[in-house]
Each structure stands twice: as C-alpha cells, then as structure tokens.
Amino acid sequence: MKFELRDKELAADILERIGSSGIKAQFMHVCGTHQDTLVRNGLDTMLAQTGIRIIQGPGCPVCVTTPKEIEETLKLAESGITITVFGDMLTVPGDKRSLADVKAGGGDVRVVYSITDALKMARQEPDKEFVFMGIGFETTTPSTSLALLSRPPENFSIISCHRTVPKALKALVNMGEVKIDGLIEPGHVSTIIGEEPYRFLSEEYKIPQVIAGFEPVDLLMGIYMLTRQLAEGRAELENEYSRVVKPEGNPKAREAMAKTLVETDVKWRGFPVIPETGLEISDKFDAHNARKKHEDLLAPIWDMEFPEPEGCKCGEILRGITEPQDCPLFGKACKPGSPVGPCMVSFEGGCAIAYKYQRK
Amino acid sequence: MCLAVPGKIISLDGDNGKVDFGSGVVREVNLAMLEVSVGEYVIVHAGFAIQKLDEKEAEETLKTMREFLDAAKRSVNEQSEQKGD
Ligand code: SF4
C-alpha cells in the first residue's frame, strides 16, 4: 500500500540511538494499534534490551467498556431489538453470555463496519427497532455524531459508550500506581482532538509526550523523541505524526461532537468513575438515545452491579500494572476462541495481541 | 478500533465519496468531516474519513526522519565537544 514506511535500516539506526542514549525509562502508550505494531515487529523486546520498557494503558475501547454497558446491550438484544455492533464487541463476555451467544440463541445481532451500515439497515427495515452500540474514543465518536445529525429514522437509536482519552490519562497519573516517564499519544485520536488537550500533562505533571503514528519507524521515532526529551530535561508535547495530525486536529469533527454529545462522568473497566470522560447523547437527540427510548428495559440494570469475569486481570492490564502473560488464565482457560475477558477479544486487546504473536 | 487506513478519493457525491485503498479495494466513505477534492488522500476509520493525509509530507517522511536524526546527532556531538569529552 502507498505510504507504508518500512525502512529497516532507518529503524535499526533509531534503535541504536535509543540504546546509546543510555536512557532507561518506562513509557506508556494508549492505543491497541500501537501495541500491535510493537509486538508484531518484536519492537517491545528490542526496546527492552536497550532499557526502554513500553507498557499499555487503557487504549482499547472495547476493553474499557464496562460489564454494565455490555449488560445493557445484551438486555436490548434479548428483548427483541436488533443490535448493530462493531465486530470486536461480539464475543466480549457479559455476565455469563455474550452478544454472540444471544445471536446463536436467535437474537438479531448484526456486525457492521460503520454506523452508516447500521443506519442503512434501519431505513430498509422500518418495522424493526435498531440500536447501534457506539464504542470508541475520539477517533470513532465523530461518526456517531454525524449519524445523529443526519436525521436518522425513528426506529434507530444509539447506546453511547464513547469515551475520551486525555482526562483518563490524568486520572491514571493521579492514581500513582505506575511509573510513567513518557507518554506515546494515540495518533488517530489526535487527528480529531489535535495537540492542545494533552498539553497540561506535560505542563502540570512534567511528563514528556509524543503523538506517534503506527508504522514501526513512527513508533521508534516517537520513542527516540521521548528519550531526547528526558536526556535534555524537557517535558513537552511533540508530534511525530505531523503528516496526519494537525495541531488543531479536526475542527469540523469536534463541532459535530459538541452539537450532539455531552461530557459525563463514567466508569472505565479497571478504573473507578473518571470525571468528564464519558460522552452521552445530548437532550436534543433523546429520540435517538437508546437509554431514553428503552429506559423501561434498561433502568433495572442501572442499579445493579456486575462483577469483572472471575480471575480476569484486564483491569490491571488496562492500568499498565500487569502483563497479559502474568494472568494465570492466559492461553489456558482464556483464548481467543473462548475468551474470559475483553482483552482477549478485541484485536486491540493486550491479551489477544500477546496470544496472536507468541504462537508465530 | 482506532485502526485507520489511507486511501485516495476517486469520486465525490455530496458528503460521500469513493475511496481507493489500493489492491482493488474501493469503498464508499463519508467525507463530511473534511473539505476534500478528488485525488486527495484521506485517513479512513469505520467508514468515515477523519483527516487528510498530506501526500507530500507523507512521501518525505523517511527523509525528514533522517534529517531529524542527523541534526540530533550534530547537536549531541556539539554538546559533548562543549563539555570537552
Ligand atoms: S488472559 Fe483472559 S482472563 Fe486473563 S486478563 Fe486477559 S482477557 Fe482477562
């Protein structure tokens, strides 16, 4: 494909420089695609040899979605409503069952590539009630917003499980459980939000940050830039992925978000409630907010508590304090075909990535 | 989920357009978030173009990286010279 950056020599050169800098540090990224690049290309191991440890944060939207949100969607599916959902949500276990199980039992659960497909289905089948499960960070959220602004049909609503990244990083830093010498910020979230929303992390907490792309050389370059900051005693926000990420992000996308969604305090899997990191559909669009439209079905769930799957360490993995291989269920009771937790389901989940590439 | 891939706009129809991802893959993409024209490259995520890709900058990325590294090397050398070691 055009624009693939596969330059082994350059990658080796950057690695060399990271090594010879003598910097030993622990950097966190917040993106499943970064994790994939790291593990697929063996960069995590190569970097570890130079003294740079890369840990994962809460960068998998499917994984941070809470058991309660999954229960909400399961309940709707079991009540005869057609659920449209991104593929990597299908087999995430809720309490004892997944959407795939409900589908196997005759429920109408459909995988879509885009919310546009879900809208199309709802228009084509006006007698059916459709709910789209809106999952994702700022990269995905604008598509939900544009769908809301596109005058969706009456039989279409959205259950918003969207979340935003920068303030979650603040919460993570404030929890103080994990040493973070630098942050690798997610390139595609940044295409929407731009540079500004991260800056306070460098200013207030003195953490170096680099927005990085997804090719191996992008990541290595981003990591090298972080080591340079440490060597020079700087804590700034830098942008390695400037061919795509503009300083101002995508104002049109943010405008659509502002018109349709409001910030809420929301729980993330593995975390307590994090203030202002949830996005709920604003009142103007109540007719398309599944939590309003189907309140009778969902309200009983809101007061209930749903435990994490027994033995699953996803929560700790999402906080960067545990590695997938440290989970006693990894590769044994928990595999992609029989996942115990979401980190083994989503292609952005740390456990799924670790499992996929360890077998090669 | 945040996986997004570059493609080239080959036609436009209101907010939508056809995007060529190479290897014969062409998809209908929503372009409402951007001001675009045919022939430009965009980054597409879940059926929506989320940002333009600066073609020239993309083509020169590797070159820019090399230049950055060379400049960095020079400045490190200068620093060590100043320190006298
Ligand atoms: S291996 Fe399975 S059970 Fe263990 S943390 Fe990962 S998803 Fe959870």
Image (cartoon, rainbow, N blue to C red):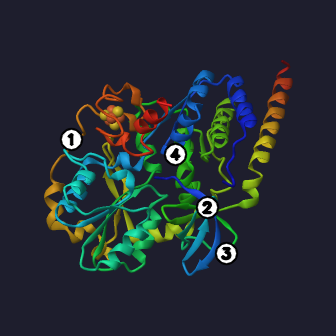
**Chain of residue at mark 2:** B
Label 3: element kind? loop
- Regarding ligand 1, which quadrant of the image does it lie in? top left
Q: CA distance from mark 3 to mark 4?
A: 28 Å
Q: Position of residue A354 (x, y in %)?
A: 45, 33
Question: Which tag, 3 or 2, sits closer to the chain's start?
Answer: 2
Amino acid type, mark 1: Pro
Whether discs 3 and 1 lie on one chain: the answer is no
Residue identifier under label 4: A33
CA separation in Å, label 2 and label 1: 42 Å
Q: Which residue is mark 2?
A: B21
**Numbered badge on residue A307:** 1
- List x then y, in percent, for residue A53: 54, 28
Find disc 3 in the rendering and name its residue. B37
Q: Is residue B26 visible?
A: yes
Q: Position of residue A173 (x, y in %)?
A: 44, 38
